[in-house]
Amino acid sequence: MATVALRRSSSTPALPKAKDSRIELKTNQMVKETLKTAAAFSGVDLTAFIIQAASEKARRLLLESQITMLSAEEFEKVNALNQANDAPTEGLIDLMSGELFNERKE
């Protein structure tokens, strides 16, 4: 079954390049040794390994939160509804003129 991805219109914030913040972590010795071994295997130090892994996971999570997956059939239904030349409903007019929508536009 084919799927279609629709991306929502917000951007993922860029990570700052300056290292002006500190994060402290507590874990057990086994997890620390596992991370150190994986970092060495990757050719980076422990801090770089943790930052790279956490940053990648965060970016992926934020990107996934901006995407809606539809099957080809669902996409065709949504697309047909979007292509219809129906006048907006009273509810849609109320929604689009409401306070919440106007705050987002600014």
Image (spheres, rainbow, N blue to C red):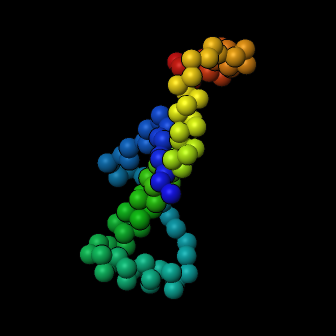
Residue occupying the point 31% across, 48% down: 17
Residue 62 placement (x, y as % from top left): 49, 49
Please identify the quarter of the rendering in which residue 80 is found.
Answer: top right
59 shown above or below 8: below
Mark count: 0
Residue occupying the point 52% across, 18% down: 106
Residue 70 placement (x, y as % from top left): 54, 47
Q: Among all residues in the image, which is located at the extreme right?
A: 91
The reply to whether residue 10 is visible in this rendering is yes
98 shown above or below 22: above
Residue 102 placement (x, y as % from top left): 60, 17
Q: Nearer the viewer, residue 33 or 91?
A: 91
Q: Among all residues in the image, which is located at the extreme left?
A: 43
Please identify the quarter of the rendering in which residue 86 is found.
Answer: top right
Q: Is residue 94 left or right of residue 56?
A: right
Q: Is residue 104 left or right of residue 59?
A: right
The reply to whether residue 51 is visible in this rendering is no
Q: Nearer the viewer, residue 97 or 44?
A: 97
Residue occupying the point 57% across, 22% down: 84
Residue 97 placement (x, y as % from top left): 65, 13
88 shown above or below 24: above
Residue occupying the point 37% across, 83% down: 37
30 shown above or below 106: below
